[in-house]
Amino acid sequence: MKLLYVIGLILLLVGTVVGELIIKDPGYVLLSYQNTTIETSIWGLVIVATVLFVTLHLAIRFLQYVLERRRKINDWNNNRTRVRANRRTLNGLLALSSGDWQKAQRLLVSAADKAETPLINYLAAARAAHEEGLPDASDRYLEQAQKVMPKAETAIGITRAQIQLSRGQLEPCLATLKRLRGIAPRHTFVLKMLKQVYLQQQDWVSLSELIPYLQKNDVLKGQQLRELERKAYIGLMKETLDQLPAESDAPARIKALNKTWKSLPRELMNDSDLIASYVSLLAQNGSEDKAETFLSDAIYREWDDSLVKLYGQIASSNPAKQLSTAKTWVHEHSDNATLQLTLGRLSLLNAQWEQAREHFEKSIELHNSQETYNELARLLKHLDDTEGFQKLMKDNLDSVTESLPKLPLPAGNT
């Protein structure tokens, strides 16, 4: 109240002073423009200018108010539309997760233009269309995704590659993945998909070239990496021989195989599976003696039952030497069932029937193996040892039935 009283006094004082000045000297102003002139007092001009200023100021403020209200209304409408679009997007994603492909497409596509993340809408719609078996619609949605967000080439490309791989379109999928690898060379999912495509194509050369990058970028490690290496390099050795002309002679085939073997990473040359594959291919292509020598050296460096078994299946040109080599292993591995099986087979190669029988029987004592039972049964049959053959069959049957579940059986001879 006191403030209003003071302001009123000040305005009254200012008005009094201004009034005195106007009466004392109203002043004179002449405005002329071409043929038009305006005459007024200086105080009249001040009043007119003040009125115009106030009027213009109020008009601007009113316009700002109208525009602000319009903006708020638009924001409210846009926010409402966005909320509805986001809700439809969420429902579309839920439909996609539950396998309702048609509903997912309808919701996702209808909300794409107003949603905050149209890229997700179109990518999800492409997956739904693919699952529904609509390849044209799926490709169209991917094109829409590219239009709304051209910079998201990696995300779009991965979705495209997944769909192509699922369709069995290996060549287009491979082209997509190679383009993506050029954009993101260390992208783990791209590398993993490349591995999958190469495996399906049985492109062992490309897969072997990819393996170091899989290891470097931790796409695969440990046992998974080792299994992939085995598969790739075993396939590579076989592919080397398959690609040779049909008229290639044995020396040419062995030369090509050896070249591929020497190209393998050094740490893999002691892998038993790779050694076994290499030795088998040597033997299959007329180089049994080299296979025997290579295999015996590998066993000497590191004992491995699978390689010992393979040694008994190699028919070298000197079976006596081969048997003698295997016998030297008995000192350290006398109780090894696999070695006894191998000694039995090598004894057969040297026509030592009784020694073969003893080794097979010793192997069965150490470990019940159906493979060894079969070898011994075949030998007894050719020796016309009916009694021994029947006893072996009974022992084999008893051994097998021990692992069967206890079930009722008809009365009879046991």
Image (spheres, helix red, strand yellow):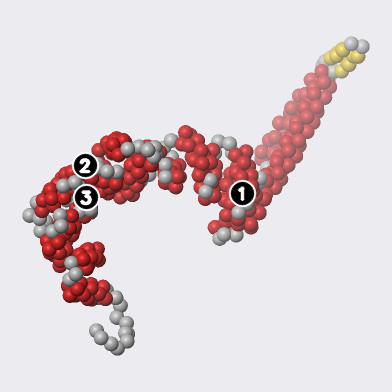
Residue located 32% across and 38% down the image: 249
Q: Amino acid at mark 1?
A: Pro
Query: Who is closer to the viewer here, 18 or 326?
Result: 326
Query: Who is closer to the viewer here, 340 or 136?
Result: 340
Closer to us: mark 3 or mark 1? 3
Dot 3 crowding, Cα within 10 Å, few <14, some 14–19, many 20+: some
| Spot occupied by residue 349 in the image (x, y as percentages of width and height) | 18, 55
Q: Is residue 345 visible?
A: yes
Query: Who is closer to the viewer here, 45 or 191?
Result: 191
Q: Amino acid at mark 2?
A: Lys
Residue 135: give its label. Answer: 1
Residue located 32% across and 82% down the image: 407
Residue at which label 2 appears:
290
Q: Amino acid at mark 3?
A: Ala
Please, what secondary structure does the residue beneath circle 3 have?
loop
| Spot occupied by residue 228 in the image (x, y as percentages of width and height) | 35, 47
